[in-house]
Amino acid sequence: MYKKFYRKFSQPSDICAPPILHMACHSHHYWPDVTLDAAQEYWHDAARLADDKWDTIFGKKIPAWQNAVARTLQLPDADQIAIAPNTHELVYRLISAFDQNQPLRILTTDGEFYSFTRQLERLEELPNIEVTRIPKAPYATLAERFERALQTADYQLAYASLVFFDSGVVFPDLLRIAEGRPAGTQFVIDGYHAFFARPVNLHGVANKVFFIAGSYKYLGAGEGLCFMTIPAPCTLRPVNTGWFADMAELQNRSEGVNYGNNWLRFAGATMDYSCLYKGLAIFDLFRREGITVGKIHRYVLAAQRRFLHSMDNANHPLLNRGNLIFHDLEQGHGHFFTFDCHSVENAERLHKALRARNVLCDRRQQLLRLGFAIYHDENETYRQVFSG
């Protein structure tokens, strides 16, 4: 039903080979066909307008993107959505706003994405940084354990993923926990594996959390455009600040380093906006076709059920329920499955075997990840994964 928007697929050159089954959707979604014209539109705007392109980008394109994101997440103020080439830039800009001469206590989990994990490990080498990591497993008690730590200790920053990148498991009750955060704690939700995959309603926590995500994965617009929602009012003054944050005063500079009361507070500097054009084209396409995040999620849930049915009938030595990492497959899971193959060697062999059958997926050490998307056929049984 939705595959018609993704016709520019790469297919095997060998006509006898099985069709490509792209199950690395959680890593890189295929781009809808409309993105080709959008990328060309960006080129033509830049070539035709030269420096005047900034009027179009900042006056029309960025507000349109912010409004689309705000509608998707049910945010009350689109102007509180900062953009940057990647989430790491935004998170580190936030961290830089804390007084570097004072202790900085950070609460997080042991399941966060590599860029944040690496940054924390480096920050821990500094004498004023203290990090507490709550084990994500067992997932059934994660919310209770994380909330207890949040409420019983003095943390300046809390950071947790809404959907864990390594398993696809949804952090239970994370929005409720964030809503009740202590007043002195800045709370960041990594929503990358939730945005445009699962319905997310931030209306009740819009002024309690920073929510970060981007367009690289489930939106399918490619790399280079991420965002962070900013709770209002926000008076933080990032040390890591770019010239975009001072745009309003470029022609009439005032004394000191000033910050706006909108997204430019966390703005950086010049970037490539081709992804902005592609993302807007996708938002427009989905709006015209009536494709909502809710419909996408229901479509993927149905695909996951078909996969599980084929898996249960296959009796695969590695791809089975005993090795599937999950907490609540119906209500508390993202758009990919992760299997613990118990060793790097097992995962590597399975990854290569699937590739030989034109099943494209990825692995992280001993973990094999298989993703689902709306460009999978609505009657796809996923038997190609298990045959052989």
Image (cartoon, helix red, strand yellow):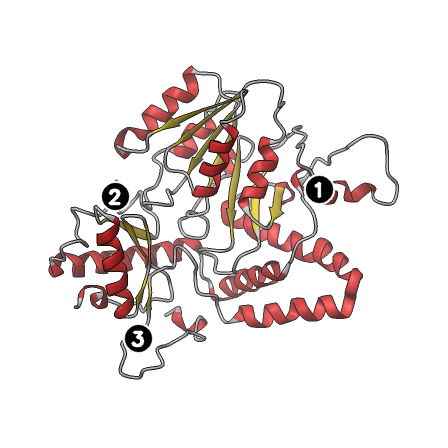
Question: Helix, strand, or loop for circle 3?
Answer: loop
Give the number of the mark in front: 1 or 2: 1
Indicate the position of residue 259 as horizontal and vertical percent values: 73, 34
Q: Quadrant of residue 45?
A: bottom right
> In the picture shown, does residue 50 fall above or below 77?
below
Q: Amino acid at mark 1?
A: Gly
Q: Quadrant of residue 149?
A: top left
Q: Secondary structure at mark 1?
A: loop
Pointer 1 local density, CA inside 10 Å: few below 14, some 14–19, many at least 20: some
Question: In the rendered image, which residue does mark 3 sit on?
Answer: 19
Residue closest to the eye, 62 or 102: 102
Report the side of 73 relative to 90 (left or right).
left
Answer left or right for 225 relative to 291: right
Secondary structure at badge 2 equals loop
Name the residue rendered at 39%, 68% in the picture. 2
- Residue under label 2: 326
At which x and y percent is residue 299? 33, 59
